[in-house]
Image (cartoon, grey):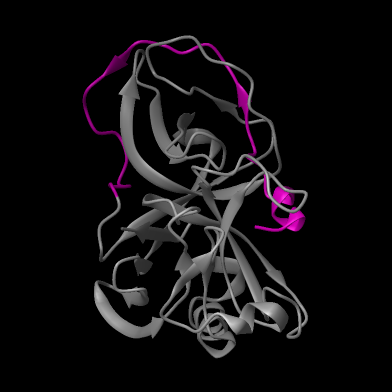
Amino acid sequence: MRSALALAATALTAVMPAAAAARPCSPATAPTRALAWRAYVPAATPVRPSVASASRPLTGADAWRLVLRTRAAHGGTCLVQVRLGRRPNGTRGWVAASRVRLRATRWRIEVDRGARRAALLRSGRLVARWKVVVGKPSTPTPTGLFAIQASYRTPAASFEGRWILSLTAHSDVLSSFDGGDGQVALHGRGGASLVDPLGTAASHGCVRFDNRAIGTIVRRIGRARLPGVPVAIR
């Protein structure tokens, strides 16, 4: 949870919602262990935090977002619900399908806080599994279905190791951390973070990987395809 993670804010501006009809309108489906959809949401795209209630402004930069479901609004407009990278955790918003670009992803990352392990899956099948460092009891790693928001390459000797993969997740305990807003990330290890062994609960909420492991995630998925990839933490 570094100040650099604050660069990955949500890319959206709000509009008034319309009444919705409960019928599917897009090939995009809810995320599963084998398949998820990502939506590219351009800047200034109207967003509805709720289909049936008043909305409020949300701003940020262009980004790929994890698709949660689709729905047809009044008048036949197809809406896509996406995960937003803002507080509180679990925040979502609706955007018009005509304003976004949809892409399927078969990649998924799962983090088991109890076992202190993380797994990389493709099409529901295990690709690799590693020991990780999760949040300590006083600053636990939040649970839920999140998504990768952005990636940052860092010097190997830095506290976060080679890579930082920021998530659409924030600490449930810390409202700010080290100049940032308490955003949670998957990242490597270096410098002082090497003191805490893999397989322990010692972080401020982020999930720390061996540098080779986080490098494998970036290489196998591809850096350009990382944003929007689902990350399930339990």
Q: Position of residue 69 (x, y in %)?
A: 32, 39
Give the residue at the far bottom of this rendering: 212
Is 5 rendered above or below residue 33?
Answer: above
* Residue shown at the point (55%, 59%) measured from the top left: 227
- Using the image as rendered, state which of residue 57 and residue 208 is in the foreground: 208
As displayed, is residue 90 above or below residue 36? Answer: above
Quarter of the picture containing the C terminus is bottom left
| Count of marks overlaid on the render | 0
Q: Residue 9 in magenta?
A: yes
Q: Which residues are magenta?
A: 1-30
For image coordinates 57% across by 84% down, the residue present is: 215
Q: Nearer the viewer, residue 175 or 25?
A: 175
Residue 175 covered by magenta stretch = no
Q: Position of residue 163 (x, y in %)?
A: 65, 75
Q: Is residue 209 left or right of residue 127?
A: right
**Image check: 97 left or right of 12?**
left
Identify which residue is drawn at 55% across, 76% down.
222
Quick one: which residue is furthest to the front in this view? 138
The rendered magenta stretch, by its main secondary structure, is classed as loop
Residue 173: x percent and y percent?
52, 43
Relative to 144, does residue 16 appear above or below in the rendering? above
Q: Position of residue 228 (x, y in %)?
A: 49, 56
Q: Is residue 36 above or below residue 70?
A: below
Horizontal arrangement in the rendering, residue 130 relative to residue 228 (left or right) = left
Check the picture and name the quadrant holding the N terminus.
Answer: bottom right
